[in-house]
Every structure is written in structure tokens, then in C-alpha cells.
Image (cartoon, rainbow, N blue to C red):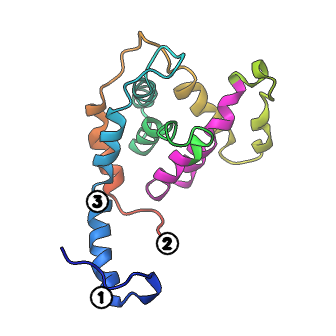
Amino acid sequence: MKKVSFTEMKNGTKEDYLFLDKHEKNFASKTADRIIKYMSGLTETLEGYQVSRLEHSLQSATRAYYNKENEEMIVATLLHDIGDDLAPMNHSEYAAAILKPYVSERIHWIIEKHGEFQTYYYAHYLGGDKNKREKYKDHEFYQDTIDFCEKYDQNSFDPNYKSLPLKFFEPMVKKIFSRKPYSFL
């Protein structure tokens, strides 16, 4: 397979970067497939919880779907905790970074901040401030994030809830990740 001519980016040519751009666009076009594959592997139970990471995500997305949210929000809800494995200390920011090019500023902000907002339900039991989210009270998406946590996140740990399968959400994931990004570079 053909390779670029450089070993340092500063020495690359236009031909090199056009060649790489073609490969990177092809790779990016398969992002949805990689996300779905990754999500399908989240079948182990969250330590101490009654449901797996996948089931929590499916419950959240199913609730968003039944609440007639748009596809962008449903996909974001499905992926809101995708960072738990690799970025447990900042999983919200990780998930938001994955979604950022493909979702609105509102949805990006909700996903990015949901971890802080979610502490409302438990921080006081661990010596923390359950009202940490109040620092955002004047932000335009403050109430939207409270609503997200209340309707789709904090209540999606029920082993008896009947979630829609991941296969149901695949077309939505593919649609969101195949459209032109809101922002790039």
C-alpha cells in the first residue's frame, strides 16, 4: 500500500495530505459502525449496578425515543456514557467530544455537563455538593440538562425495563454520523 513521503508532518507535501485526506474521510465514514460495535461489547454489568453499561444506554435511549425526542438527542442519549470505560473521571466530556461535530451546541452541552448534573442524586451521600450544578444556573441549557438527567439518565438502571435493542438505534447512529459535521477544524 502506498504511504506518505514524510516522517515529520512539517515535511509533507500537498500530494501527501490529499492522499491522507482521502483515507481519513473513508475512515471517518465508518465511525458509526465502530461506535455500534463498541456499544455492543458493553455487556458486562457496571460493578454494583443491576444492569450492564449497554442496558443503561439502551434504557436511556429508549426513554428518549418514547418521549419523541429528535434523532440527534436519541443518539446522544444512547452514547452519553460511552466514555465510562476509557475516561471514568471525565466520561461526559469524552462522550461530548465524540458527538460534537454531529450534534447541536445544545445537545453537546447537555452531554458534556450531564456527569456534573447527575451528582445531584448522590453527591451528598459521599460528602460532596449535590448542588454543584447550580454554578450553571444562568446557562441557557441548564434546565435542559436537568431534564436530561431526570428523564433519561438517573432512572435507567432498572433490570425489568423493556429497552429497544441496539439494532433498533443503528440506523439513527448511522444517519447522525454520516451527515456533514457541524464543525471541523
Quarter where residue 114 is shown: top right
Amino acid type shown at disc 2: Leu
Amino acid type shown at disc 1: Glu
Indicate the position of residue 179 as horizontal and vertical percent values.
34, 58
The foreground one among 141 and 15 is: 15
Q: Circle 2 is placed at which residue position? A: 185
Quarter where residue 52 is shown: top left
Residue 181 falls left or right of residue 131: left
Q: From which residue to which does the magenta span run?
A: 94-120
Neighbor class of circle 1 (other Cα within 10 Å; few <14, some 14-19, many 20+) is few
SS category of the residue bearing label 1: helix
Vertical comparison of 46 with 158: above or below:
below
Amino acid type shown at disc 3: Ser
Residue 145 falls left or right of residue 159: right
Neighbor class of circle 3 (other Cα within 10 Å; few <14, some 14-19, many 20+) is some
Q: Circle 3 is placed at which residue position? A: 29
Q: Are marks 3 and 1 in contact (CB under 8 Å)?
A: no
Vertical comparison of 117 with 161: above or below:
below
Foreground tag (1 vs 2):
1
Q: Residue at 35% across / 45% down in the picture?
A: 35
Indicate the position of residue 144 as horizontal and vertical percent values.
62, 38
